[in-house]
Amino acid sequence: VQDMKTLVILLLSALSLCAQTTPNQRKNTIPATNVWVAAPVGGVLYDLEVYNLSTSTLYVHVFDTNALPANGAFPTIAPIQLPANSTATISYFNGRRFDVGITVATSTTPLTLTNGTASFKMSINYGGSQ
């Protein structure tokens, strides 16, 4: 019985620590853009929704940076193909950690960044450190 009490106390302590993160924030781009520093400091990405306003396919690149990287940079997560006039959503149930910041850009090429034109709107849900 004592071991069970200890286990329950440890579990409750762990849950309490998990709850002590910065509350999630929802941010949206107002004008169409081609790059967005969604979080200028490290944090946890929970979901991202992107709408392609252009008439051509673009690729969404997400970087662990607090500024737009140079063309040719490899994104932190796999690029998302976004056909013309369509929406894509990325969701992480437990969140995806970014140490430096969260920067999102559109690219005309899939594997490395080739910065596109101001042609997407976005919404992001992120929180503080985990």
Image (cartoon, rainbow, N blue to C red):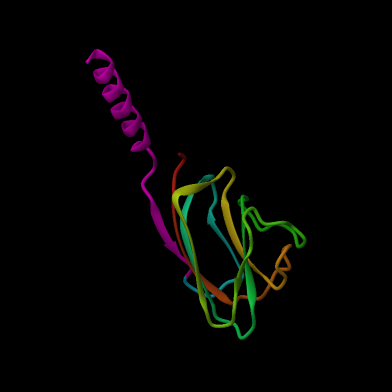
**Is 110 situated above or below 26?**
below
Residue sticking out furthest to the front: 1
- Tell how many labels: 0
Which residue does the image show at 64% across and 83% down from the upper left? 56
Q: In the rendering, at what x and y percent does residue 84 appear?
A: 58, 82
Q: In the rendering, at what x and y percent does residue 103 appear?
A: 59, 57
Viewer-side residue, 115 vs 30: 115
**Is 17 situated above or below 115?**
above
Q: Quadrant of the N terminus?
A: top left
Residue sticking out furthest to the right: 72
Which residue does the image show at 68% across and 73% down from the upper left? 116
**Is 7 situated above or below 116?**
above
Q: In the rendering, at what x and y percent does residue 41 appear?
A: 54, 46
Residue sticking out furthest to the left: 1
**Is 117 situated above or below 112?**
below
Q: Is residue 21 magenta?
A: yes
The range drawn in magenta is 1-29
Which residue does the image show at 59% across and 79% down from the upper left? 83
Q: In the rendering, at what x and y percent does residue 100 appear?
A: 59, 45
